[in-house]
Image (cartoon, grey):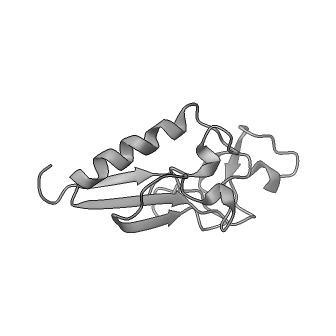
Amino acid sequence: MKKNQALVVVDVQNDFLEKGALPVPVASEVVPVINKIAPLFDTVVFTQDWHPQNHISFASQHEGGRVYELVDVSYGKQVLWPDHCVQETVGSELAPGLDTSRCALNIKKGTNPELDSYSAFIEADRSTL
């Protein structure tokens, strides 16, 4: 790798693994790949969904809300998700076996209960950094 390149490891958390609240098929297979390539980068950054229990994206926070339903919120359309990656829970933890020893920065996102976040750079309202 060239100097000044970073590896950004996005949301490799228990709730996104095969048996999590929002499972991704074969998600755990990325762990050994990340562990293998991380030493090739000058900088390794991890992101984590880190939601409060009352997060706006949770179907449980909308009366009659159904998982995967699309609803209107102050910043536009919002997909309603099952409760996931709730702060300080096992589901919010990084995946087992993930080597974090090279982590230069861990960005916890989705912390504002009234605003969803799909990016480490900008919130779902497309204006909040």
Is residue 121 visible in the rendered structure shown here?
no
Establish if 79 lies above or below 118.
above
Tell me residue 49's x, y (percent): 56, 58
The one of 4 and 112 positioned closer to us in this rendering: 4
Q: Position of residue 29 (x, y in %)?
A: 48, 36
* Residue 101: image location, x then y, percent: 38, 65
Does residue 126 appear to the left or right of 65 in the view shown? left
Horizontal and vertical percent position of residue 75: 59, 55
Which quadrant is home to the C terminus?
bottom left
- Seen at 50% across and 49% down, the residue is 12
Give the mark count: 0
Q: Quadrant of residue 4?
A: bottom left
Q: Who is closer to the viewer here, 1 or 99? A: 99
Instruction: Work out whether residue 36 or residue 107 is closer to the camera in this orientation and state it.
Output: 36
Residue that sits furthest to the top in the current view:
25
* 22 left or right of 59 in image: left
Residue drawn at the location 62% of the way across and 59% of the way down: 92
Q: Quadrant of residue 122?
A: bottom left
Most extreme residue toward the right is 64
Question: What's the residue at 42%, 57% (across, down)?
Answer: 99
Q: Is residue 46 visible?
A: yes
Q: Residue at x 69, y 66 (%)?
A: 52
